[in-house]
Image (cartoon, grey):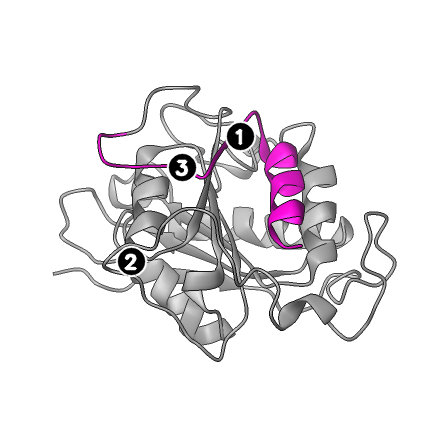
Amino acid sequence: MASNCRSSSSCRGGRNATGAGCAHGNDSHDHPRLSGRCSKRPGRASDGATGNLSGVPGLFLDRDGVLNHFLIDSVRTIEQFQYYEFTAEAMERLGCLGYPIVVVTNQSAIGRGWTSEEQVQSIHQQLIEDCSDWGASIASVEYCPHLPDAGCECRKPGPGMFLRAARDHGIDLDRSVMVGDSSCDIEAAQRLGMARVRVRTGRGDPPLTEGLEADAWVENLNEAAVWIEEWCR
């Protein structure tokens, strides 16, 4: 059974990783939002909620359809990796909050032989560098390379990528939020008791699978960032 997700980690902090110099608010270097804020989440915690009670809130983002344009046959090369026009502003907003930002993405194109792990790693390194330029430090990019029928624990809606990031970055999942464009994103977060924001970019606006609930439906990542700013107050 495949069980190991992969990770691309940031080796350097973004220029606003502590909230310094943010145009959207927090100018302190002492992470004033990291104790107590975001402790009240909208929505309900699921039976499978798992958290690091001594940890901080985390901001989890899907990749394709949230940060960059979704392609039905997968983004396979760095040339196909194209951001939305609002991505830079959204990441600046999220970077100002001072929380760990983690990208969690299913990349079965690797398992299908459509792209290589090296190509995916190069995309993620570019993503980390671009977000740093925009003022957001990406703690890590967690990705599952396996096919849907591989039986792994890391492919969303499985918990593997989230649990790994929570362990590595000291994140309390029960005080965290997930932004995604699909039912599998929302299901993964709901199982773990996280807040859930559904964007209408990527796969459009299909209904969620029965039994799933999002705490907010918004047009895009920038609107999600505004919602998260309010959620953190």
Disc 3 to disc 1, C-alpha distance:
29 Å
The answer to whether 200 appears left or right of 157 in the picture is right
Tell me whether the residue at label 2 lies in contact with that at label 3, contact meaning CB atoms closer than 8 angstroms. no
Tell me whether the residue at label 3 lies in contact with that at label 1, contact meaning CB atoms closer than 8 angstroms. no
Q: Secondary structure at mark 3?
A: loop
Q: Marks 3 and 1: which is nearer the front? A: 3
Which residue carries the number 1 mark? 80
Which image quarter holds the N terminus? bottom left
Picture coordinates of residue 57 (x, y %)? 54, 64
Disc 2 to disc 1, C-alpha distance:
28 Å
Count of picture labels? 3
Q: Which residues are magenta?
A: 209-233
Disc 2 to disc 3, C-alpha distance:
18 Å
- Residue at 34% x, 37% y: name it: 213
> What label does residue 214 carry, if any?
3
Q: Amino acid at mark 1?
A: Gln
Which residue carries the number 2 mark? 159
The answer to whether 24 appears left or right of 46 in the picture is right
Q: Amino acid at mark 3?
A: Ala
Which quadrant of the figure has residue 135?
bottom right
